[in-house]
Image: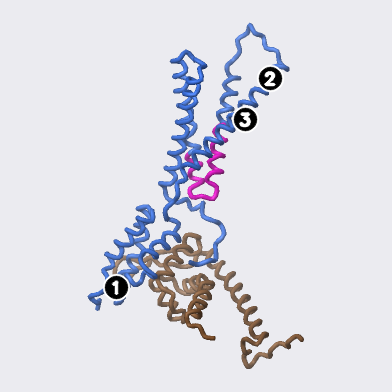
Amino acid sequence: MREASLTDPKRVLGELDRAWRQAGVRTADRRRMAAEVGPDLRAAAEDGRDPRALLTPDLETFARRVAEAGGVGRTQPHYAAVEVGAVAGGVLALVVGAVSAVFLNRALSALVDLDRDRDYSVAGPVLVFGGMAALALLGCLFGIHLALRGRSAARPTLWRAALLLPPTAGAAVAAAVAYGRSTDYSDEPAVVLTECGIILLACAASVFAARRWALSTPDDEADLPAVYERSVS
Amino acid sequence: MHHPIADGERHSQFLRGALDICLLALLEQSPSHAYELADRFAERGLVGIGYGTLYPLVTRMRRLGLIEEHREASPAGPPRKVFRPSPAGRQALASWSAQWLASTAVVRSLLIDTGALAPPPEETPCVKRP
């Protein structure tokens, strides 16, 4: 027979849910854990035990330990680190690419003498600029990888950035070219800076979206450490 | 000198090192849900291991692939989720049990050799080095 002083299991579950919400646990994970703990609380009540007393040492600590043990606690987004890594990696790779293109151009010019009266395919310049863009993308992704090393949702962020960056950068370059055309392709510093800013802002927004998208999806089991830690909390 | 509080902490430290092995062993013997596990520990003389310790431990070991879950029909109410060791968990149990035996044998031998622990009547104590 249940004692009058016993806490209702539903009320305890409600408090647990509040504690998990405060710990940043996502809705799906809260529901899953509640579905597991709920029957145990009801079983305790049916055995004449206080369900709240089951959650040692206290409800808040229990909620936190379960969230940590399940790897579903609050995840630090590290947006600033991701953006800095992406921009630094992308810009550095672009500079390396540009310098390499200049040296390559000089070397090839010394080797090959092109006929100035002839029209040549644009494939060459397209290949060069495409290569630089690809290099910038790889540099961006490498920068994200370094920034998120050892942190949660690193791999999902990388995959989503690899998916979002190319079309975003392409659209941003087209927008920058359109802007440049509107100024008759002026080489004024303000115009050039604006064109660079358009591309930079678009790519930064894309990286932010990739990180947010990665954090909003369930944990990737492949990110768990391979070695089991023997320590028990 | 007897320190009751310190003894309680020592006891907890000892248990902490073997809790995961004992958990896997009990689940291997008979799959059960977390609520039942606390009583099973107490029946074996390991008192003080509450649901508040066991459920987070089960959660962590499941996350690391050492424990798997399956639904079991309940006599009253909807099916309950019960836990049992996974193949990786069984491997870990065998390995850690051997480690535990080896470690405790070394400690026991040291305690007997140094006279801190009296040997069982059937054992002959080692000859002490000068």
Disc 2: which residue: A106
- Comes first in the chain, label 2 or label 1: 1
Say which chain tag 2 marks.
A
Q: Secondary structure at mark 1?
A: helix
Does A151 appear in magenta? yes
Kind of residue at badge 2: Arg
Amino acid carrying mark 1 in the image: Ala
Marks 2/1 in contact by CB < 8 Å: the verdict is no
Crowd tier of the residue under label 3, counting other residues whose Cα lies within 10 Å: few below 14, some 14–19, many 20 or above: some
First reached walking from the N terminus: tag 3 or tag 2:
3
* Residue B117 appears left or right of B14: right
Q: Which residues are magenta?
A: A136-160
Tell me if residue A191 comes above or below residue A149 in the rendering. Answer: above
Question: Dot 1, crowdedness within 10 Å: few (<14), some or many (≥20)?
Answer: many
On-image quarter of the N terminus of chain B:
bottom right
Horizontal and vertical percent position of residue A11: 27, 64
Q: Chain A's shade in the image?
A: blue
Q: Residue at x 47, y 37 (%)?
A: A207
Q: Where residue B121 appears, x then y in whole percent? A: 63, 93
Q: Nearer the viewer, residue A199 or B30?
A: A199
Tell me the distance, in whole angstroms, between the alpha carbons under discs 3 and 1: 68 Å
At x 65%, y 87%, the residue is B115
Q: Secondary structure at mark 2?
A: helix
Say whether mark 2 and mark 3 are on the same chain.
yes
Q: Which mark is nearer the camera, 2 or 1?
A: 2
Residue identified by numbered label 1: A45
Q: Are marks 2 and 1 on the same chain?
A: yes
- Say which of B89 and A147 sits in front: A147
Q: Nearer the viewer, mark 3 or mark 1?
A: 3
Q: Name the residue that disc number 3 marks.
A: A96
